[in-house]
């Protein structure tokens, strides 16, 4: 462990920790980034989990928010090796009988395929797609007076509703199912308020840029961020799992890319009783059960749209998806779970040996579940792609405990750093106008347990670092255009 004095220490090398470290280093400070694992990246790691030559994304896989991040767009990540590959179809949603709905880059093409719901889809999405470039930095940040209040109000009227309520805008099974799959990324019952928010954002960025995969694996996003940080003069220390403030070198500001549970463990004695009490009441959401496959060929989806898509939502109708998410949230394990599947090797040949393929999938399960969902997930894939099981060369599975062992921020398998419902949308991790500050002077939280929550966008780290620059160093915080 280094004993050198630093202006700032950042603990955790996920996208938010890396973003915070970069912002601080850009300001001319001496910054040390500490990672408990030997490999940097947090949820952005890639490994050969099954067979030699098959590169799998251990956690996150498809990255519309990374490509569209207001902060990442300011960084020269391409110069540091990051290349995004864009599937022809961003996401496809198959139904029993061989039909599918799809999210295309073209707003009109997506709407046209929805038949009678064409105009309803355009009425919902066209204004948001037009306003999103100006809204992004407000939506992906803490609660504050927005730069575009009218557009923000229009977004909020839909975003704060439940997905099941907003689905009433549509009549067809195709439009309602496509919408349900998007909203289910919120990882909570679709009847909850705010579940429309993530679905609307994912669809808007899909129409503006698509849903890309990083060539070579999600690790390449982390590698590019690390490379840029080091090029600025930043220092990195790996293999130092921080459990106490006593492990850290002297510093003026500390930014922790951890969830409330670890914050209490690491710095609880420095925090006020009131703040500790709020952290102890913080709520985590559903977990995930994940599978990676090495395959002998591409997945033989019946619907042609699915064979052109990077992401597939497997859940059939809105009603079936809503029932699945409701069961998982209530502590049950659905026989037909909603499955999010990615097939990166269709678009990035570096992921598998020639003629072979990879696939990545997970379903939502009760927090802390150790039930093996392999049969249920593979059954859902086979349902829409007969012959899939015959292609499996090897699989690698991770239950919620194994997810948390891989990344301690995934408490009980919760990959969002806490449920993002109405009670924890902007008031995460506590009720305050400055969610990145803790009650201890100079200590900040910069993880997905702060606004805007989960996703590979780095905005939690960006905003936390801006707060620290202003509070501790009296430096002008960077702004996004």
Image (cartoon, helix red, strand yellow):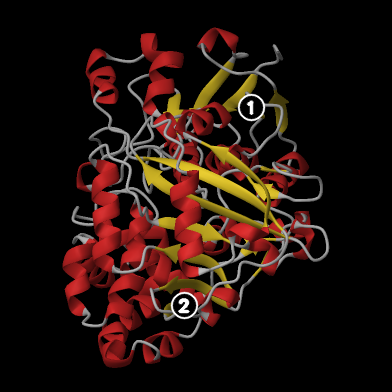
Q: Is residue 184 above or below residue 9?
A: below
Q: Please give the count of numbered marks on the rendered protein.
A: 2
> Looking at the image, which is closer to me, 318 or 372?
372
> Looking at the image, which is closer to me, 398 or 179?
398
**Which of the numbered marks, if any, corresponds to residue 207?**
2
Q: Which residue is drawn at 56% across and 46% down?
A: 291
In percent of width and height, residue 70 lies at: 51, 60
In percent of width and height, residue 257 lies at: 50, 32
Under tag 2, what secondary structure?
Answer: helix
Q: Which residue is drawn at 60% across and 25% down?
A: 7
Q: Is residue 455 shown to the viewer in this render?
A: no
**Which of the numbered marks, if any, corresponds to residue 35?**
1
Q: Which residue is drawn at 67% across and 67% down?
A: 298
> Looking at the image, which is closer to me, 470 or 385?
385
Q: In this view, does 330 lie to the left or right of 75?
A: left
Q: Is residue 250 left or right of residue 182?
A: right
Q: Are marks 1 and 2 in contact (CB under 8 Å)?
A: no
Under tag 1, what secondary structure?
Answer: strand
């Amino acid at each position: 462990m280094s004993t050198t004095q630093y202006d700032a220490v950042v603990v955790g090398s996920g996208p938010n920790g890396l973003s915070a470290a970069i912002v601080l280093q850009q300001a001319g400070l001496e910054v040390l980034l500490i990672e408990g694992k030997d490999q940097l990246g947090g949820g952005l790691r890639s490994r050969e989990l099954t067979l030699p030559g098959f590169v799998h994304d251990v956690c996150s896989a498809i990255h519309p928010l990374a490509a569209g991040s207001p902060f990442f767009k300011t960084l020269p990540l391409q110069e540091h090796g990051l290349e995004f590959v864009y599937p022809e179809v961003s996401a496809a949603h198959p139904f029993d009988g061989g039909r599918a709905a799809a999210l295309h880059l073209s707003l009109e093409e997506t709407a046209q395929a929805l038949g009678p719901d064409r105009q309803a889809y355009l009425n919902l999405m066209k204004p948001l797609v037009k306003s999103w470039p100006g809204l992004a930095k407000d939506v992906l940040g803490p609660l504050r007076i927005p730069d575009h209040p009218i557009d923000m109000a229009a977004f909020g009227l839909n975003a704060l509703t439940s997905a099941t309520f907003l689905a009433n805008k549509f009549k067809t099974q195709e439009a309602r199912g496509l919408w349900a799959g998007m909203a289910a990324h919120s990882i909570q019952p679709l009847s909850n308020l705010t579940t429309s928010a993530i679905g609307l954002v994912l669809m808007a960025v899909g129409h503006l840029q698509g849903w890309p995969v990083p060539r070579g694996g999600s690790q390449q996003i982390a590698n590019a961020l690390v490379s840029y940080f080091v090029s600025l003069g930043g220092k990195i220390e790996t293999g130092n799992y921080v459990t106490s403030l006593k492990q850290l070198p002297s510093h003026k500001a500390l930014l922790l890319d951890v969830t409330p549970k670890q914050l209490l463990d690491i710095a609880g004695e420095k925090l006020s009783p009131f703040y500790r009490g709020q952290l102890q009441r913080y709520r985590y959401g559903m977990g995930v059960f994940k599978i990676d496959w090495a395959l002998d060929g591409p997945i033989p989806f019946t619907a042609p749209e699915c064979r052109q898509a990077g992401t597939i939502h497997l859940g059939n109708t809105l009603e079936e998806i809503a029932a699945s998410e409701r069961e998982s949230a209530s502590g049950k394990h659905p026989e037909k779970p909603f499955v999010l599947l990615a097939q990166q090797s269709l678009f990035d040949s570096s992921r598998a040996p020639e003629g072979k393929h990879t696939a990545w999938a997970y379903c939502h399960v009760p927090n802390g579940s150790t039930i093996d969902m392999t049969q249920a997930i593979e059954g859902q894939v086979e349902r829409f792609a007969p012959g899939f099981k015959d292609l499996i060369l090897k699989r690698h599975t991770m239950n919620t405990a194994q997810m948390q062992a891989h990344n301690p921020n995934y408490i009980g398998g919760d990959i969002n750093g806490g449920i993002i419902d109405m009670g924890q949308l902007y008031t995460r991790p506590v009720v305050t106008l400055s969610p990145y500050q803790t009650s201890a002077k100079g200590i900040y939280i910069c993880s997905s347990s702060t606004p805007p929550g989960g996703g590979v966008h780095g905005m939690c780290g960006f905003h936390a670092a801006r707060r620290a620059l202003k509070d501790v160093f009296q430096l002008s915080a960077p702004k996004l255009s």
